[in-house]
Amino acid sequence: MPRRPRHLKPPAHFLLCLVLAVGPAALAQAYVAAPTPVRVLLATAPEVTVIASGPHRVITAAGRATTPAGLAWPVTVRGGALVVDGHDVGANLTFEADGGTLEVAGRRYRGSIRLSAVGDLVEVVNVLDLEAYLRGVVPAEMAASWPLEALKAQAVAARSYTLTSLDPTARYDLCATDECQVYRGVEAEHPRTDEAIAATAGVVVTYQGEAAKTYYHSDSGGAVASSQEVWGTRIPYLVAFQDVQTSGPHRAWTARLDPRLVSASLAAAGVGVGAVTSLRVVRVSESGRVAALEVTGSGGSRVLEGVQLRSLARGWGLKSMRFSVTGGLDLKGAGWGHGVGMSQYGARALALSGYDYGRILGHYYPTTALTRFVAGGR
């Protein structure tokens, strides 16, 4: 469930080179350069152990060596360099699996594991093919038991979001949490989500010949939000509209905020109102989400809005900004997540009503098209 923007355009090598057909009724096709592998930040820690299930290669600045299966490699940092078995191996170290997997912190991954010394910590990055990466993302973001067309929509949305997140100037492209997309490696893989990924191989949501930034969230609560109202950035296909009602567990919720938690978080943020006693909605956005909230305490009142409000609300444990105050610190709300783009529970509801994945994506990303990316020339 991606939370906020990183890049609004894909890197140049993923721009479409040739569109053979356009429009919602046809699947367009584009020829692109061979895709760059996806680099996923798994962790940063003082010490990391990499375990190989099969034969693998170890690559340092000094060269590479092939080693047998079953070896465990504990790695630390000393003086700005990685240390293995007491030996300085430089700032970077890569493990490449030869058909097997590599394990880090009890979780197995495909592709390679790249370790880097970053300050006093080891940075762990999994480098792998896009489609292999999706096998660990789609079932982590959406239950594999859900309708296949919803899973296909999730696969395409995740693929599109990934392509627009690739950044060759950065040390990695994505993290493995819901700050980017949830990624859980091999253990998350499931035959049904594998089927959805394979059935949509290479298919991407595009807008005016470029991959679209396909944000998604858990449940819209009956109204999708625009990128403008949530992040202050207008993206033509991320607009507000009334959404399908779902049967999900977050379609409606209530909450009673802890006054001590709210007061402490406000004080830490420099909002001096003393002991908080009540909240009042001052303004709502076009999708009905709270855009300005007045907090009143023993020391006065302040109006919160924008990034500060959303950050504090997350700390208070609110599922979404689509809520009303029923009295004091009691809230009644709907939905879960930022509300921009595809609602995952909404995709499920639409699939159950007979929508295929193309119609689902067209519903949540209006004015976009579906394009199949094909590596190489015509």
Image (cartoon, helix red, strand yellow):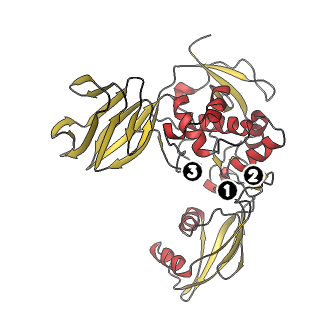
Tag 2 or tag 1, which sits nearer the N-term? 1
Locate residue 41 relative to residue 9 in the image: left or right: left
Q: Quadrant of the C terminus?
A: top right
Calculate the distance from the C-alpha at mark 1 to the C-alpha at mark 3: 12 Å
In this view, the residue in front, 135 or 317, is: 135
Determine which residue is flagged by label 1. Answer: 229
* Secondary element at image label 2: loop
Please tell me which of labels 2 and 3 falls first in the chain.
3
**Image coordinates for residue 238, horizontal then vertical, percent:** 70, 46
Gap in Å between the C-alphas at discs 2 and 3?
16 Å
What residue appears at the point 75 percent right and 52 percent down from the top-left corner? Answer: 240
Horizontal side of 197 relative to 122 (left or right) equals right
Is residue 210 something that shows in the picture? no
Q: Which residue is mark 2?
A: 240
Q: Secondary structure at mark 3?
A: loop
Earlier-in-chain disc, 1 versus 3: 3
Residue at the bottom extreme, as displayed: 298
The vertical placement of 29 against 184, above or below, is above
Q: The residue tagged with tag 1: helix, strand or loop?
A: helix
Question: Which residue corresponds to mark 3?
Answer: 4
- Residue 358 picture quarter: top right
Q: Which mark is residue 216?
A: none
